[in-house]
Image: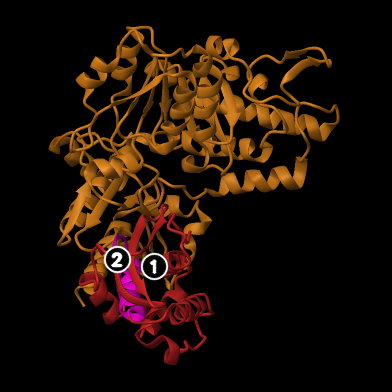
Chain colours: A orange, B red
Amino acid sequence: MTTVRSPERRLAAEGQRAGWDVERVRRDFPLLARPVNGRRLVYLDNAATAQKPRPVLEALTRFYSEYNANVHRAVYTLSEQATAAYEGARAKVQRFLGAAEAREIVFVRGTTEAINLVAQSFVRPRLTPGDEVVITAMEHHSNIVPWQIVCRERGARLRVAPMNRAGELLLDQYAALLSARTKFVSVVHVSNSLGTINPVPEMIRLAHARGIPVLVDGAQAVPHGPVDVRQMDCDFYAFSGHKAYGPTGIGVLYGRAGLLEDMPPYQGGGDMIRSVTFEETTYAPVPAKFEAGTPNIAGVIGLGAAVDYLRALDWDQIAAHEAELLSYASDAVASVPGARLIGTAARKAAVVSFVVDGVHAHDVGTILDQEGVAVRTGHHCTQPVMDFFGVPATARASFALYNGRDDVEALAKALVRVRQVFAA
Amino acid sequence: MNALGELYQQLIIDHNRTPRNFGSLEDANRFAAGDNPLCGDRIKLYLKVADDVIQEIRFEGSGCAISQASASLMTTAVRGKSLAEALNLFNAFHGMVTSPPDALPNSKALGKLAAFGGVRAFPARVKCANLAWHTLRAALQGEPQAVSTE
């Protein structure tokens, strides 16, 4: 996890700059070699989706060209190979997250589906009128709307733990929200629009002290460093493959085995049953109970390859590198006349959200794109965060392990162009 | 001129910075709102129509330079025009921004509005230029509920 805590730490990061070889890692990502609008691509929209390393692309091609078959069904060789690769990837994800058992890993479409699964299958049956679900002020819409749906249906109330102007969670106010009425807590690990790293272990400890189970939305955390669900002690953890250098359309829900076992299925269909008659169906054990229908086999195998790729990297070096990029980019953006950072938490991932006075974020985005710089502009599916800061939208540069100082310099140069166009 | 210069022409930058006919209209008899929720552009349009002519038009809104300049220029273009003339302008404008980038705009019909021809090189921004015009059409056709061009 990229963390900037103190000047001393920042200095340590600078000392390690030589440690992480950006040029070498870039060669693993074929897409980064393409030009955009006649310029070198400067891809700074990693919080939306990351580019894919060659081993992931090769795993997808190999599956489709060498052993494509449905899983868990047939007795022929191809199907056995596909099943072995599919279940092998589950074991890889289990180790990646530090889960106790492979069956605690449920494959879903992405973080959104993981949260909806827990909302519908775990929380909905437990909610009665007057109960409460607690989230934070910096949630992505995917960790707001699923709770609104179940709360409305059950007459429960959604409570929101506030943050300060830096975009940091107010831990004491979060603690004060937890009560006997609280039936569930669902919190974002790293904010996608602010970059804030939340103190999830402490938040979980506070919830568990009252017997409240906790889901952590890890979509923006997993791409920036190792996560250990047992050390964190969360009950559920969700992330998307495509933000972690894997394919789109595949994600992971980790859940404690005991909780998953108690939950009813989310969808019915093939592959999730033990036996079916027209009178009665017995369900398969977890995780198959939650994986109805033919799964995204290629996506799972590709995710397995992404996890292998990530596990082989030196994360201390990457964390130092990303912390340095964050500090360099924050200074570069803040030095542009009229530019203001949105999200200045002390503990931050390498995400730089900003607004430019008198220039709408979409105009910033269009001008940057002409310079080859890809950033996200808009509300980032966090409209309540935009409302809190009183801005309609921000431009957001989000960094990954293949970004370097040259990318920050290209961003800074392109921002000068924004000022030129709008000064005309 | 390069594509960016074509998009952010002086006229557009100027209307974004100093929008014309900005504000609400107390005696408006036509109204419509436009909203592109994904990008956050918003337009409210107030019109006073009498004898089939747009006597007065004002707008309120927030959003990108293209959306706000388009609304501002539109109000200057349709003020004093008959409803039929305004709808013809809608068609001419819509036709221009959705035509291939190399097609020549009908500058005789469009006048200053031809400045928005540069948006054709930026497909993601066509909806910004179009929002005010679709809102106008909704107002003229008596459909005050929010329109969207996303």
Residue A309's spot in the image, x, y percent? Answer: 51, 39
Q: Position of residue A226 (x, y in %)?
A: 41, 30
| Residue A194 visible in this rendered orientation of the protein | no
The number of callouts visible is 2
State whether the magenta stretch is mostly helix, strand or loop. Answer: helix
At 32% from the left and 39% from the top, the residue drawn is A384
Please provide percent x and percent y for residue A408: 28, 57
Q: Chain of mark 1?
A: B
- State the residue position of label 2: B59
Q: Residue at x 24, y 74 (%)?
A: B20
Against A260, residue B19 (above or below) is below
Query: Disc number at residue A251?
Result: none
Q: Decide if residue B138 is on the left or right side of residue A406.
A: right
SS for tag 2?
A: strand
Query: Which amino acid is tagged 1?
Result: Ala
Which chain is disc 2 placed on? B
Residue in the foreground of this view, choosing between B23 and A14: B23
Give the magenta range: B59-79
The local crowd at label 2, few if under 14, some if 14 to 19, many if 20 or more residues have their Cα within 10 Å, is many
Amino acid residing under circle 2: Phe
Give the residue pinned by disc 1: B132
Q: Which of A25/A231 is in front?
A: A231
Figure check: A180 above or below A318: above
Question: How far across and how far down the image is residue A317, in percent?
Answer: 33, 39
